[in-house]
Amino acid sequence: MLGLARSRHRLTTALAALGLVAAGVAAQAAVTAAPAQAATPHRILFDDGHAEEAGNADWIISTSKPDPLGQDSSPSAETDWTGALSSWGVALQKTGNYSLKTATSALTYGGSSATDLSHFDTLVLPEPNTLFTTAEKTAIMNFVKNGGGLFMISDHTGADRNNDGEDAVEILNDLMTNNSVDSTDPFGFSIDTLDVSSGYPAAISDSSDPVLHGSFGTVTKSLIADGTTATLKPADNSSVKGLVYRSGYSGNTGAFFLTSTFGSGRVAFWGDSSPIDDGTGQSGNTLYDGWNDTGATNAALALNATAWLAGDGTGGGGGGGTGTCTAAQLLGNSGFESGSTTWSASSGVITNSTGEPARSGSYYAWLDGYGKATTDTLSQSVSIPSGCTTAALSFYLHVDTAETTTSTAYDTLKVQVLNSSGTVLSTLATYSNLNAAGGFTQRSFSLAGYAGQTVTLKFTGTEGSTLQTSFVVDDTALNVG
């Protein structure tokens, strides 16, 4: 306990000047999702929160939302559920290996809603017609990065069904190029601004590919009826692979259906919504039965791809909300030795100043200590796999103060857990000038109750108008198993 009122000075180096990286990026990269277990149904979420029913479209598996079983709990024919994607949904439901839901509101990852992405293995975006918000793009990208499957289905350029100035081509390209997680061509492809009127794009020859040769059949051709293609960029992501090509194209151009990976997750792209349209749905919509087109194998392609995205096949997959857990330490830059990397913090909080000692190494986090009204924060977002039964948060804390009271907490440090929307889920502890002592003390808390969620760990130091209190944090960890 120093007990000295002083003007605080922070020393920084080039490491501390690296800038703040979006909270949770490196931490979430440390999470490795395992393949979904056969005994657990693959959990598929179909999006209907972005004008998928606008205009003459009807891209839903059922009018019963979020649970299609509310319309028919044991469907045997595609007409048992109402929607242009009902054939897709019913085919999956009949296997007994899938649990299907529909999202009708903003997409989240790490929240408490029943359709939060942490509860699913695969997200299907069937021709979205409104832009995803910044928060939604962060949720989607982190979901995939942590092991989720993403099925993106576009349509031709100009297919603006709700006349808001955005079509699926622009919306999906925006998701990939304008997000807070990775905007440097994370999936290795871009969607072409084309309107290809018709054709039967052919599948490549690859007998080992689980999407072309899966449990739902063999894919030979697809259907394009006013759709688009994609340009592959393997230099950006070597896993990108074209499976079905527009006639006359191959290699990196003209890919009508492709797959890729990102982090621990999988990605599929289809250049037209016509192949998933089963021709039936709500009255008043103009639909076309591409699902059963005899010149193509669209059903096999959609179903095999869904299975692969959800974790079937060899390696990868399993979902951002996977029920498995690999023992690991999840926090990035846990000892602050990489400066501000991974953490989001107030200016100067992460430092190598000699004004306070680090517990180990040179860097640590120093909140408050100015002797004037100040609020400092330190936070990091992290995803805790749903299969983890233990999740132990620990950190070392040293408190010194110039306050002389033995009864009043003038300066405080709150340790909290927040969801992806910034709502406080729990205050784990509150420390104050009354906890001042020499040296560091390890503090530990269980976060097992947040398994399956993405949460933000946040330290908030609040100092009064006079007499400094310094809260020094070092050697953090979140060990799961």
Image: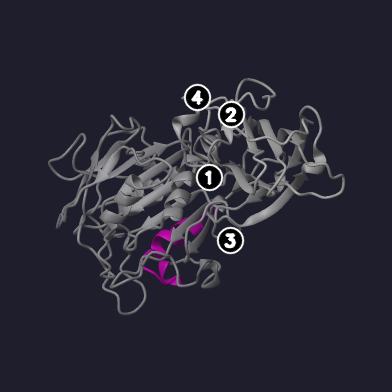
Sooner in the amino-acid sequence: mark 1 or mark 2: 1
Asked whether the beta carbons under mark 3 and mark 2 sit within 8 Å of each other, the answer is no
Residue 314 colored in magenta in the image: no
Secondary structure state at the residue bearing disc 4 = loop
Q: Residue 13 carries which label?
A: 4
Q: Tell me the CA gap for discs 2 and 4.
A: 13 Å
First to last magenta residue range: 78-97
Amino acid type at image mark 3:
Ala
Q: Please name the residue that numbered disc 1 is placed on.
A: 320
Question: In this figure, which residue is indicated by the disc labeled 2?
Answer: 336
Q: Quadrant of the N terminus?
A: top right
Q: Residues within 10 Å of mark 4 (few under 14, many from 20)?
A: few
Amino acid carrying mark 4 in the image: Thr
Work out how far the residue at label 4 is from the one at label 3, CA to CA, in angstroms: 45 Å
> Which amino acid type corresponds to the residue marked 1 in the rendered image?
Gly
Mark 1 and mark 4 in contact? Answer it, CB < 8 Å.
Answer: no
Q: Residue at x 25, y 50 (%)?
A: 222
At label 1, counting other C-alpha atoms closer than 10 Å, the crowd grade (few under 14, some 14-19, many 20 or more) is many
